[in-house]
Structures are given as C-alpha cells and as structure tokens.
Amino acid sequence: MSEAGRPPLPPEDLMGALSTGDLVPEPLASDVPLPPPQPEARYEARPKGRWAEDGEGELLEVSVGPHHPSTHGVFRMDVVLEGERVVRLKPVCGYLHRNHEKIGEGTSYLGSIPYTDRLDYFCSLTNNWAYVLTVEKLAGLQVPERAEYIRVLTAELTRVLNHLCLVGFLVHDMGAMGTPLMYAFREREKLLDLFEALTGSRMMCNYFRFGGCRCDLPPGWLEGVQRFVDEFPRFLDEYERLLNENEILLVRSQGIGVLTPELAINAGVTGPMLRASGVNYDVRKVDRYGVYGRFAFRVPLGEHGDTFDRYMIRLLEMRESHRILGQALRELPAGPILDPKAKLRGFRPRAGEAYGRIEAPKGELGFYLISDGKPNPYRYRVRPPSFVNLTILEDLCLGHTLADAVVILGSVDIVMGEVDR
C-alpha cells in the first residue's frame, strides 16, 4: 500500500504507538449485521422437565471436582445449572484408575489378595472375602467352621466402620463441621485398633486366604471385640439423639434425591441404596454364604427412597451388625482356620470359571474369574457396588439444587478405589 493510501494513525493515547510497518485494520461496515449467537450443540437436547424448558433462564455449566471436598475423592461432576437447579449432571470418573483387573490377570492368585484391599480402602476385609470366595468356588476348597465365624466377625465390624464413616461424612456435607464426624471417627479408631492387632495393618488389611484365614486370633482379640460390642449401643443411642431430630438434617434429607424401586432394580443398584427404596434384597439372606444362615438378623427397609431413608438404613444396619457380632462371639467354635488341602504356593486351580459375591457394606461386591489351569487367572473382573450405584446419580439430582446434589452424592456412599478399579 502506498503512503498516500494508508489510513491515518490512531492517537497514541488510545492505541499506543505503532511502528511504521503496522497497519490498522479497517472497521466493519455499520450496515453489515453480525450473525446471531448460536447455542452450543451439547445443550440442544436438554432433558425435558420443569427446570429444562426453553426460556426458563440461562444455563451455566459448573465443574465440581475433581479436587473438591464434596466429591469424596478424585471425582468430578459436570453439572449444568439453571439458576441453582440441576438440569443435567454427568459423573466423570477415571482419575484414580489403577488397572486393577489387568494387573490381576498378570499376578498369581495369591498375589492378588493384597490388591483387593485397595478397591474399597475403607472395607479391605470384605474385599478379601469376596475375592477368596470366588477362588474357593473355582478350586473346590472348603473353609473350616472357625474360619467362617472369624470372617463374619471381621465383615460385620467392617460394615459398622463403613456406615459410621458414611453418616459422619454425610452430615459433614450438610454443614455440620466437626462434632458428628469426630464422634464417628472416635469409634472408628477402636475398630482400626482391632484390625491392626489381627492383621498387622489398620486399613489395608491382608488377612483372608483360600480355604480360611492367614492365622488364628491373637490373644486378647476376642475380649477387645466383646468390649466394643458391649459399649457400641450406648454410643449409637447418643448419636441418634444428636442427629435424628436435627431440623437441618431433616430439611436437607427428607424428600431429597428420591430413588424409586423400579429405577433401583433396573439400574442394578444394591446394598443400603436399594433397601432404602423398600426392596428386600440382601446377599447374606439370598445366598447365605459363609455361616450367615445360622444368625438371626433383620433386613431394614425404607419407605420413601430419599436421602433420609438412606441415612436411617445405615443406622439400622449397624444395630443388626451388632446383633450378628454378639451371636458370632457366643458361638465361635474351636478348630483349624485353614483347609489342609489349600496349597498357597504354586496354587493352580482347575480350568473353569466362577463368580463369587458377598453383601459388602456398599452393596453387592462380586468377582468373576476364568482359569485356564495356570498360576494366574485368564480373566479377572470386578463388580464394584460403588461404580454401579453411581450410575443413577443424575436421576437423583435432576430438579434439585447444587447444594442438594452434594448431599445426594454423599448418601450414595462411594469410594473411588472401586469406582475406577
């Protein structure tokens, strides 16, 4: 462009000094209208409902997590809001993926036991049980009676520990900063002391073996369990008085995140989530694995399927676990704790396949194994309750506020180690 054809330089106080080689772009003609903004394609098929009708308001997408206290670990909720109301919510997983199943296919059967306790790291002993139960089906091993009773003791102590933490974290999500969670953790410490005395570890317990248990009970362990059983009802009564009539807890949980029985069954939801919706299903009653068929205990059921029912089911299940613990302590037999036919070194089960499941604290925990006669499984798959129960999170949160979504997520009770397995 010739010097005569260049547009004049703008004032320095507006645009700054321009070098002689810079060109100032010509402004758009005022008679050329700008194209109207187009909506993003991902919002064109919004879910229909009272909070998703066109014209109700502007939408806002919020990423809750992955590093957020309300998401209970490295988990993210991609939430679309209309005002404060949730119109769409997508769980985003995978931040803690450890390739557990593929590692299991390259590890010996015995070597996989320490990996199972890192699935649900709050409930390592029940993870051990579900895995060894599957291998025992595959290999045709029998478990001595004393070992079966010890497994029940450790599983019900684990259930109490899990539900204590769930209630503490749930009320913490509602804004109760401190007291309810610390009360729950005070009792949890007593249980961790028992696990440490039995297994040598407080959280990542590696105790079960194919055909029984690794070792017998240490001196004084049963007395410690009995002491906990004697003291626990008094704590639970006090805990319920503290929480059950709290008006904040009632307002934040009653009628919030209702899960219908039809949706729960169709989505494969299990555990306290399913029973809070009124569905009578407990693997301890259905399969009667171990020696659960010998114990008298009830299966608590909810009526409304909301967050409050899910909270109450955990409290009631702790009382039933207390009943089972009392019976197991009274009836614990003497005898061996390992099947003499179980070969832990060079273990090679016969070719075949097996699926074993238990009623873990969060729901049905299952393992599926295929053996080709080698020291490691040909196929190794896990059915984790946290992952399956999480699939209906959006259905529970639609129409509620973002603050309600935090509480609803807390009531599902997830641990990311088995979500991302």
Image (tube, grey):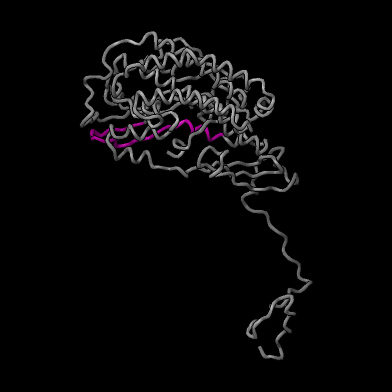
In magenta segment, residue 391: yes
Q: Quadrant of the C terminus?
A: top left
Q: Is residue 375 magenta?
A: yes
Tell me if 69 is positioned left or right of 141 in this view. right
Left/right placement of residue 327 relative to residue 177 reads left
**Residue located 48% across and 34% down the image:** 415
Query: Residue 414, relative to residue 197: is it above or below?
Result: below
351 left or right of 124 in image: left
Magenta residues, start to end: 368-392
Residue drawn at 64 percent across, 83 percent down: 19
What is the tally of numbered marks visible in this picture?
A: 0
Residue 166 position in % (x across, y down)? 53, 28
Quadrant location of residue 397?
top right
Q: Position of residue 273 (x, y in %)?
A: 54, 26
Which of 231 and 144 lies nearest the eye of the viewer? Answer: 231
Quarter of the figure that contains the N terminus: bottom right
Q: Observer-nearest residue: 174 or 98?
A: 174
Please indicate, yes or no, whether residue 352 appears anywhere in the rendered image.
Answer: yes
The outermost residue toward the right is: 31
Does residue 359 appear in this view? no
Picture coordinates of residue 62, whole percent (x, y): 62, 47
The residue that appears at 43% across and 43% down in the rendered structure is: 97
- Side (left or right) of 93 relative to 113: right
Question: Does residue 20 sit above or below 384 in this rendering?
Answer: below
Residue 206 x %, y %: 34, 29
Image quadrant in which you'd find residue 364: top left
